Structures are given as structure tokens and as C-alpha cells.
Image (tube, grey):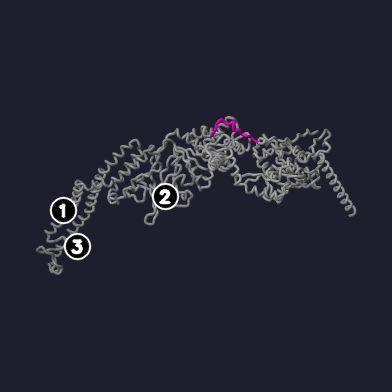
Amino acid sequence: MADKATAEARRLAADELGWTCEPESLEFETSADLEPFDGLLGQERAAAAIELGIALRRPGYNLFAVGPQRLGKHHQVRRFIERKAAEESAPPDWCYVNNFRQSHAPNALRIPTGRGREFKDGLERLVGDLKEALSTAFQAEEYSSRRQMIEQELKDRQQEAFGEIEKEAEKEDIALLRTPMGFTFAPVREGKVIRPDVYKTLPEDERTRIEARSQELQEKLRQALQQMPNWVREARDKLRKLDEETAHYAVSGLIDRFKDDYADLPEVVEHLDAEKADIVDNVEGILQAPQAPRDAESDSPESSPVQRRYGVNLIVDNAGQSHAPVVYESNPTYDRLVGRVEQRAEMGALVTDFHLIRAGALHRANGGYLIIDARRLLTSPMAYEGLKQALRSSEIRIEPLAHRLGMLTTVTLQPEPIALDVKIVLIGERMIYYLLSELDPDLRELFKVLVDFDETVEREARSLGDYARLIAGMIANDGLRPFDRAAMSRVLEHSARLSGESSKLSTEVETLCDVLREADYHARKNDRSTVGREDVQTALDGREYRVDRLRARIQEEIRKHTLLVDTEGRAVGQVNGLSVLQMGGFAFGRPSRITARVRLGRGEVVDIEREVKLGGPTHSKGVLILAGFLGGRFAAETPLSLSASLVFEQSYGGVEGDSASMAELCALLSAIADVPVRQDLAITGSMNQNGAAQAIGGVNEKIEGFFDLCAARGLNGRQGVIIPQANVRHLMLADRVRKAVDAEEFHVYSVAHVDEAAALLTGLPAGARDDEGKFAAGSLNAQVAERLRRLAERRQAFASAEGSGAGTGQGAG
């Protein structure tokens, strides 16, 4: 079947090489005339996702915003959420107080918005007045009288018990003596204790009587002494009850009046009742405690033990908030997210209490929104796991990281968990989201809303106006000089270049903002009140100059013929290919020589880059595709009888991508047909097995790379670049290239098929098959087919000769 006639390469006009924004098309004089754009430009998909995530107050509907870097995702998301948060009420305050039953487990109190500071200050004043009130009560005459009565009562009972025994002993001429060893009885005569030697001279029956009576009195004394601890205990209980009554009376007035202000908060009332009971139980320690400095906070080490025991640790104070909080945590470590318990040194030991509980970002954002950078979260040990645990349980549990890892067994505080109601917004690149989605099943349960930011926006009349307003807002927010229409048009053109397509604008606002600042610097340097087009261009040139050291060195080495790339003449099996090098955020084109050699063989096309492991898989795929095209076109019925080798000359750092496959095929066709190729042209483009040209990336940088080399050597009006037709819409070439094309000093050609490129490079028609399956005489394809036919015949002749020799040898054997 006959092939269709191939079309010819089309030479592009200068106005097809990029979009020009005419300043007259902008309906303002300077950016100061524009109202800043308030919204997410070109991000309708992202805006809808944010709306849904905010509106659905259900578990798991947290947001994950994705997109390339420098899109300003954080700024745009935060600004959008802040507008929504402004419509919501401020959340309550949270504080920790002592748990008098279990001091290692402080209680969390929820206080209505703004009343937390009032509660803390009021309770600290109350505690500060506590010692004075107690001292006054315990120094009162009534307390002293009642205490003396209890003490006198105990003394009277003791004296009464001893008095009865003493009287009974006196009747028997026996005295009750108090000695350092205790109580004892001794006989007396005439009021004096009988000496031991005299006692021995007494009649035996007298001594027997005295000893018997002494033993009876000793038993009564023992019984009396046994009763005394009970009497002391009863007195002590009476004194304790008196102290409790006095303390209760002293603090009830203070606490009850304070409690009336929080009657609507049962948890606060319960805590104040517990505090009052604990004060009554520990009144003696309170009276003996040292006084704290007057200006000492309750959570400072200098505060008194009383303040530290009965004070308040206000960890979330929303008194200044008029709406829901929007918190951005720039360093999302585990402790900074969920909070921590600090320690202080006392007498060489580390101690802690509930005043040393510190809030985390989840506490501050509770009732609102928390924005976190996903990459930083994932690189902080256990931070992501801690965040997931809080979201799953809907509570913030402060737990030391070492405890969570099972590495620490020391006793520490276990604060009561706080109920969590927050929207989490993670911001990161798409790769992070998709990797997590694949590896962590929790992600899709906890972050159900994907906010996918687009890199570009369609360049339409409405979007141009909104984009100009967006830039005007950036200018105003940074306090820059106004940009005139010409300057704004240049910024818009650069945005189209960043988007990679002339019909679109880039949403890479952070890069644009850098350009705006640098243009403002040049305007200020030249003492201009407004920023002009020349200032923007100077800024763009400066940004390129600062990072193009490597490009300049490569261009210099090519000009000096250290790196071999021809821009004139013709050569067989040699084509100028174009590649892109990416260094940080700067991409530039590098012309490279691609060569092909052919010889008699078995149909292999050897990719030298792949053989030495310098070629990536996509490049190897491109070589295999061109080999498939070659076999399909020229060896449908007869096997290929050649071996070919392809290589990027002087390439030592690896080759990836299939954008050189058209150039490699043209070099291979030239080598097979022994037809020279124009060296004043360079080519880039991918192809499929049918030979159709396919779009590639970095087309602007590739064209500019070859143009700069040609311009440095001198433009001759014949030089140019061949690109796929599908890449024409991506063109946003620099002014220097457009001017050269307009002056016909340089050319850009588009092709839809590899035949068009081969014809332009060789100067021969590609040639189509006729009804008999033959290519037109004199065409490139005809010469390729003829050379392949001769190679096949030669291979067949070699095979016949080898077969004949083998047979003769066997016969002779």
C-alpha cells in the first residue's frame, strides 16, 4: 500500500514565537489604580476543596494542600482560611490546676473565652490574701481562748488522775515521785522519803504492807497512764477541729465570694471546693510557708509553695481573640505540637508541677485551624504520629516523647487530656502526598480533602485583569513603587514564560514577587517614582546573570571547540541535538553533537549511553522506538542487516529523556544513506514508532541555547532549530531570538513527522512509497532502502560462503 505524501517543515514567523502583551491593552496607568485581587486566582478546584473541608466539621475532613514549590500555597491557604475564621467565634480558654487527690494528674479546666486570665489573676489574688486571712483568724482572741480551754481541759484531766493516786498514796504513807526514768512510789515518814538503809530496818510485815500497797498504786498509775494518750488524742482532735473550723471560717468568705462569679461553670466550682478543703487540711503548712515576692508569678520558681499549689496555669488565653484562631507552626516537632512538661532544678534535683505544663500548637489552634508544612512535619521524629494520635482520639494528651518511645520509665506528670476540635491543613508537594497515600493508610482517613493547586491559569481577558490585580496586590503589600503599564505587561509576559505555554499564565507567585522586588530596587536606584519595563527587564537579566555561570562556561567551551558542535557546513551521520540542564531553579539549553555509525550486522541499534549506564530508561526507550520505526519502514519483510551505534558525543554526566529520538533517527538515516546533514540546524523532539513528532519539555531554553551559540559565532541567515509542531504553543522566546527571526537571521521550524525534519536537514525529499512499495527515486528514504538492500545481499553472501565452507569441511572429515 502506498504511503501518504509527507508535508514540509513550516518556518515560524516571529509573532508565533511567543505572546506579546501590548501595554495599550491594559486599562490602567499604574498598578496603584487597581484594586488588589482578593481570592485564589485560577484555583477554582483548590478553592472548592477548601470550602468543603472547612464546612464539614466531621472527623477526618482535614486538608492536604499540594502543588509545586513557590506557588505561594501557604500564603494563599492562610489568607483564604483567615477570611473564613473571621466569621467564627473565638474558642474557650484552657488552664491546668492542681488535682489534690492525685497531684501527678493535673486537671484541665475549660473557661469561657476571655475569662481564663480573669480566673487566673483572681485566684492568685485570693491565694495571696489567704495567709493574711488565716493569720488574722488564728490570732483572734476567740481562737486563743478556745485553744486554751482545750489544753487546760487536758491538763486538768491529767492532774485529776494523778491527784487521786497521790491522795490514796498519802493515806498509806507512800509518796508518788517523778524521776527521769518515770513515776515511782516510795515510803515516807513524817513527810520525808525513807532512805533505803532505813527502809531495810523496818519490820518485815511493814515492808510487806508497803510493797503490796505500792504495787496496787502502781497498777492504778499504769491504768491512768494508759488513758492519757486517749486524752491527748481527744484534745488533739478537738484542736484540729478547732483549726478546721477557724480555717473554714477564714477562707469561706474569700472562696465563696470568688466562687459566685463562676457559678455557671460546675468544673470550676468543683475545683474551688476541693481547693478550700485542701486549704483547711493544710492550714498549718500554709501558715509556716515563706512569703513569695510580690511580683512573682505563680508559675515562676520564686513563687511561694502556696501559690504553686493553689494557683492556675493558663495555657491557652484567647482574651485577645475575636474569631477562631489560625495558627502556623513553622517548626512542627512533637513537643511543639502536643505540648510538653518542663522541669526545674531544685537542690540539685529536677522537679516539676502543673505550672510547668506548656501548650503546643494544637492547644493554641484548638477551635480553629492549624497550618503545618508537611515536609517539616515528616522530618521531625514522631511528630506525624503524635498528630495522627491526637486526631484519632480527638484529644490532646501531653506525653513525653521518651515515654511514647518506651525509653523512659521515670514518674512524671500525666495531665488530663484536653478535647480537640481543630482543622489541620498540611501543605506540601504532590510527591509527598502520593507517597504517604500509598504507604500510610491513615492519611486518607484523617486527611480526606485534597487541595490541589494548579500551576497555571488560562490567559483570557478576564484572567489577565485579575492577574494584574493580583500583581498590584503583591506590589502594595510589599510597599513597592507602582508599576506602569509597560512594566506590568513585561511581568505578564514573564508569567507566561514561567507557565511553559504562551496561552497560560503561571501561578508561581513567589517567583514573580522576587522579580517585583528586584525591579523596584532598580527603579529606586535610578531615582524613578514608578517602575518601568526597563526596570523589569533589568531585574530579569540580573536574575539570569547571577545563576548562568555554568551555561556561560559551556558556551565558551563550545566556541573554543573544546566541546565540538558545528554551526556551519554538512556532515554525514552527525546531527546537532538539544538538551536541557537544570541547576537548582535555573534551566538552560545545551547543544550537543549526536553521531551515528553503521556497518554490516544483524539489525542491532546500539545505544552507547545505555551500554555504559549513562543513559536513563526514558532515553533508552526512545532509542528502541526509533529502532522499531526503522525496522517497520525498511525491514517489514526482510531483516535488517546492519549494526548501528548512537551516542551523545562528549557527554559524561548521563542522558535522560526521549527528546533526542528524532535527532538520533536523522543521524542514523544520514549514516545509512551516506547523505550529509546540515550543521547550521539543530533539532529536538520525541517520536513514536510511526514517526510522528511528539512534544518535549524545555523548548524555549533549547532554542535559546543554540541561538546564543550561533549568535556568538555570527548569524548567517541559514541557522535555525527544528521543533515538534506540538511545541509551538509552548514558545515564549526571548526578545533577542524573536528579533533575529523577524530579521530572517535565524529560523525556527516546526514539523509534524520525522520525515519533515529529515528532509530539511538533508535537503532531500523524504520520499513516500508508491503503489508498488517503492520510494521515489532520489529521495532520502530510497537511498536508505537501497543501502539496506545492499547490506542484506552482502550478509546473505557471507552466510552462503560460510555455509559452503562448513559443508566442505564435514565432507572431508
Percent x, y for residue 645?
76, 47
Percent x, y for residue 743?
70, 37
Q: Which of marks 2 and 3 is nearer the N terminus?
A: 3
Single out the residue that lies furthest toward the left.
190
Q: Could you say whether the residue bearing mark 1 is in a helix, strand or loop?
A: helix
Q: Mark 1 points at which residue?
A: 160
Disc 1 to disc 3, C-alpha distance: 20 Å
Single out the residue that lies furthest toward the right.
812
Q: Which of marks 2 and 1 is nearer the N terminus?
A: 1
Three-letter amino acid code of the residue under disc 1: Glu
Packing grade of label 1 (10 A; few <14, some 14-19, many >=20) is few
- The part of the chain drawn in magenta is 18-30
Q: Name the residue under label 3.
A: 179
Q: Could you say whether the residue bearing mark 3 is in a helix, strand or loop?
A: strand
**Does residue 145 appear to the left or right of 708 in the view shown?**
left
Q: Could you say whether the residue bearing mark 2 is in a helix, strand or loop?
A: loop
Disc 2 to disc 1, C-alpha distance: 59 Å
Tag shown at residue 342? 2
Percent x, y for residue 650?
71, 50
